[in-house]
Image: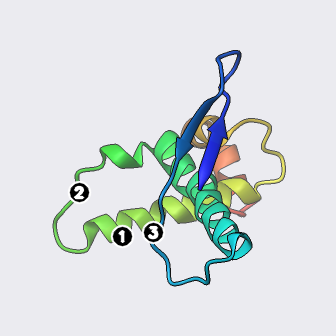
Amino acid sequence: MTATRTVGTQDPTTATRYYLTSLPGAARPIAKAVRSHWGIENGLHWVLDVAFDEDQNRTRAGHSAENLALVRKLALNLLRLEPTRQHGIKASRSRAGWDHDYLLRVLGAI
């Protein structure tokens, strides 16, 4: 699959990507699977890394890494559901840490 990417005012770059799959050779199902994968990456993993610095976590003992990942995803979902949120997830997370009333709103207690 060939992909073209343009960042800002830079010239477009083209890359060829190779995939191993058990899907039929038709382009549409393969393209759909690739877009689905990147939708998850951009919608969840990237946000977790930017807002929660997840890639820097070095927790390894027992189930602690899985438990912390679950808590981060829970916090992300609660922040996304907060209807008065005016900023990004990272700023909203910081606000919840500083503003007790906002934290209660995020948790659904108000």
Asked whether the residues under the numbered discs 3 and 2 touch, taking CB atoms below 8 Å apart as contact, a structural biologist would say no
Residue 69 image position (x, y, % from top left): 41, 63
Residue 46 image position (x, y, % from top left): 53, 48
* Residue occupying image coordinates x 67% and y 53%: 79
SS class of the residue under badge 1? Answer: helix
Measure the alpha-carbon separation of dots 3 and 2. Answer: 13 Å
Establish if 10 lies above or below 6.
above
Kindly identify the amino acid type of the residue bearing the numbered disc 3: Leu
Depth check, front residue: 45 or 11: 11
- Does the rendering let one see residue 108? yes
Quadrant (top left/top right/bottom left/bottom right) for the C terminus? bottom right
Which residue in the protein does label 1 denote? 67
Quadrant (top left/top right/bottom left/bottom right) for the N terminus? bottom right
Q: Which of the numbered marks, if any, corresponds to residue 49?
A: none
* Residue occupying image coordinates x 59% and y 38%: 90
Asked whether the residues under the numbered discs 2 and 1 touch, taking CB atoms below 8 Å apart as contact, a structural biologist would say no
Comes first in the chain, label 3 or label 2: 2
The figure's colour scheme reads rainbow
Which residue in the protein does label 3 denote? 70
Which residue in the protein does label 2 denote? 59
* Residue occupying image coordinates x 69% and y 69%: 27
Kindly identify the amino acid type of the residue bearing the numbered disc 1: Asn
* Residue occupying image coordinates x 72% and y 63%: 108
Residue 73 image position (x, y, % from top left): 53, 63
Task: Residue 41: name its quadrant.
Answer: bottom right
